[in-house]
Image (cartoon, grey):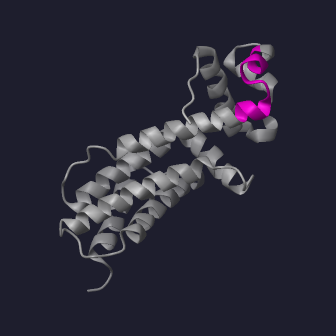
Amino acid sequence: MEIELDKTEQKIVDATIFLLDKEGTNGTTTKKIAKKAEVSEVTVFRKFKSKDNLLKIAKIYYSDYFLEKISDIFTNYEDTDLESLLKNTWWKLVNFLDNNLDIIKIALDELMSNPEEEKIFSKFSDEVLKNLTNIFQEQIDKGKIRKINPSAAALTVFSVIVEGIIFWKFESKVSNDDTNKYLDDFLDIFINGITN
């Protein structure tokens, strides 16, 4: 579902996402949204009818945004060696997640609540896993790696990226040098294994 927003609606949706990140669903009121978006509360209701509808539209809008950006990450990747390909993909994903931490936090919070709703993070992770699986399958088909379960390889890489982001951004601060070293070590283990 693609959502088109006018300039005012975009300001309101952006304010909503900002406040959801800072204050959670209960702390995000239409009054606060209106103030942050620099519009009247009446405008919020005129544009979105209710807070619940606004939250739903904001999540759908950013879910669509995520999927579009993920598609961009995985298009036109260079046909290089697996290590370079994974390193490039890793950094694109890390930068994307880093630049969208507010949405990631909302998506992770959403995983814990409302199990019946379609989740932003689920759509995002499904798209990443599908693309990573395709990369591994292409590498198998070209004879560049041995025949493995490409879905398991994709899940392994994606899990390490997400866990790394959560650890680095929400638990502690590390430099890009530390992240580079971690990535090099992970890829060495992933590509070369742990046995002598």
- As displayed, is residue 65 above or below residue 126? above
* In the image, farthest residue toward the bottom: 196
* In the image, farthest residue toward the front: 1
Q: Provide residue 143's location: percent of width, then percent of height.
A: 18, 70
Q: Quadrant of the N terminus?
A: top right
Q: Is residue 141 magenta?
A: no
Residue at 34 percent of width and 55 percent of height: 180
Q: Which portion, as a residue range, is magenta?
A: 43-55
Residue at 78 percent of width and 20 percent of height: 45
Q: Provide residue 134's location: percent of width, then percent of height.
A: 33, 59
Observer able to see residue 178: no
Q: Provide residue 162's location: percent of width, then percent of height.
A: 50, 57
Observer able to see residue 10: yes
Q: Is residue 47 magenta?
A: yes
Residue at 48 percent of width and 38 percent of height: 99
Q: Provide residue 5's location: percent of width, then percent of height.
A: 58, 22
Q: Foreground residue, 95 or 124?
A: 124
Residue at 80 percent of width and 28 percent of height: 50
Please indicate whether residue 71 sits to the left or right of residue 99 in the image.
left
- As displayed, is residue 102 above or below residue 45? below
Q: Quadrant of the C terminus?
A: bottom left
Please indicate whether residue 31 sits to the left or right of residue 181 in the image.
right
Q: How many marks?
A: 0
Q: Foreground residue, 190 or 147?
A: 147
Q: Foreground residue, 73 or 50?
A: 50
Magenta span: predominant SS is helix
